[in-house]
Amino acid sequence: MTGSRDAGCRTAGRWARAAVMALLAGCLAAPVVAGTASAHVGSLGGAGTPQSVPFWLVAITGGGLVGGSFLFTSLMTDHETIRSVNASRLGLPSAATLRRVARDGARAGGVLGLVAVLAVALVGPAGSANAAVLVVWVGWWAGYTATTYLAGDSWPALNPWRTLAGLLPERGRERDLPDLGAWPATAALLGLVWLEVVSPVAADPRVLAVVVLGYTTVTLAGAATFGDEWFERVDPVSRVFRRYGWLAPIQRTDDGLALRLPGGCLPGREAGDRSEVAFVVALLWVTTFDGLVSTPAWNGLVGPVVEVGVPAPLVYLAATLLGFGTFLGAYRLAARYARETAGTYVSAVAIECRFVPALLPIAAGYHLAHYLGYVVGLSPALVAAVTNPLSSPVLRAVVLPDWFGGIALALVVLAHLVAVWVAHAIAFDLFPGRLHPIRSQYPFVVVMVAYTATSMWIVSQPFARPIAV
């Protein structure tokens, strides 16, 4: 028995030594194979040339690795050890934890971004090449705004002022906000765009810092007094992103996120009162006005008025209010005529509030058409400025091809088509039958065509530097 046991041990030892030798051979040959593979991959970029490897070496290497792995596993014979290896696991955070981490990271990133913008605007180089100027106007107002209607409204998580307001003491949060509807937000939106046009806030980082600090002071004071209602009802920026978010294909539901057709949820939205209608119309007008002031026609119209001694800021303010009044009056007139063409007892005010979401695709389409070339052309400058924010780079824009203007016009037309469909869906949801919904759309189609034609005309105009203020 002893002799047979010794013979078995010698046989097992010979097999073990052979397996170890095969494993060593595989380990020695592995660098050769790895080097060949790397050389072959490198040849795709012209960095190297493939080396031929004999088939017998590949076969021995593969066989040695398989045999060595078998030897290694055969040495592990303890049942508990095997079970423990198979049962080993690394716990992953739950979905709620991941959402909380993402939310906290977004909040921290928003606050850090605000602090960085203020710091670079105050101590960075002068001029429009300052990183703070490019981040605010190219990265945020042009680029980020587009994400709210193309993907979804993430501003509640990123909003640095809302995060800072959450750190304020709770005293005074119970005070009720006066019921003024959306008129404060409408006035603030018109005022911000007027300030952008008449001041060097889009070119002078020091002025930008003053405006951001002023906005921060007013926003935090309002949030400290009225709480989250300030962001829901008064803050114009939050309201803009929230309205644009209605258009986005990604929507938040009770079950999580859902993917819908762009504008698919707009027929289910409704303005609460006429002040909400005014805000949506103001959103459409301010983007139009921002492009209008850079056209030769605007300079030809405003230039003589300024030359006779009328202050340019006053002229711009009058144009801001007059244009907004014209846009709002045209929409309300359409609602009044829609009541007649539809032959309905629904009031004109109710029709205004019901159909106004159909204007959001036009506003978003013109925003994208107006700023797309701006973002594409200045993205390299934005990256260069952000990576070296305290330098004084030369502001250089990418020269876009002539056909790029056709993309802008196509975006405006596409947005108009979405708006027409939304109005069609709203009409059939509001009015019975088939004829009444179709007839109710006639006045709105005329107004939307006028809005769209104005946007397309502005997009097609050559750029002209606005009249100096």
Image (cartoon, rainbow, N blue to C red):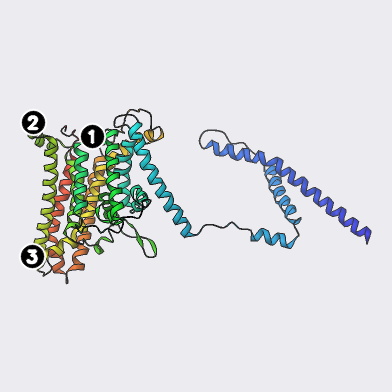
> Nearer the N terminus, badge 2 or badge 1?
1
Q: Is residue 410 visible?
A: no
Q: CA distance from mark 2 to mark 1?
A: 20 Å
| Secondary structure under the numbered disc 3 in the rendered image | helix
Which amino acid type is shown beneath numbered disc 2?
Glu
Q: CA distance from mark 1 to mark 3?
A: 47 Å
- Foreground of the two, 308 or 358: 308
Q: Which mark is residue 200?
A: 1
Question: In this rendering, is residue 438 above or below 240?
Answer: below
- As drawn, is 399 to the left or to the right of 24? left
The residue depicted at 70 percent of the width and 45 percent of the height is 61
* Quadrant housing residue 334: bottom left
- The residue to which callout 2 is attached is 307
Q: Which mark is residue 276?
A: none
Question: In this rendering, is residue 214 above or below 429?
Answer: above
Question: In this rendering, is residue 229 above or below 47?
Answer: below
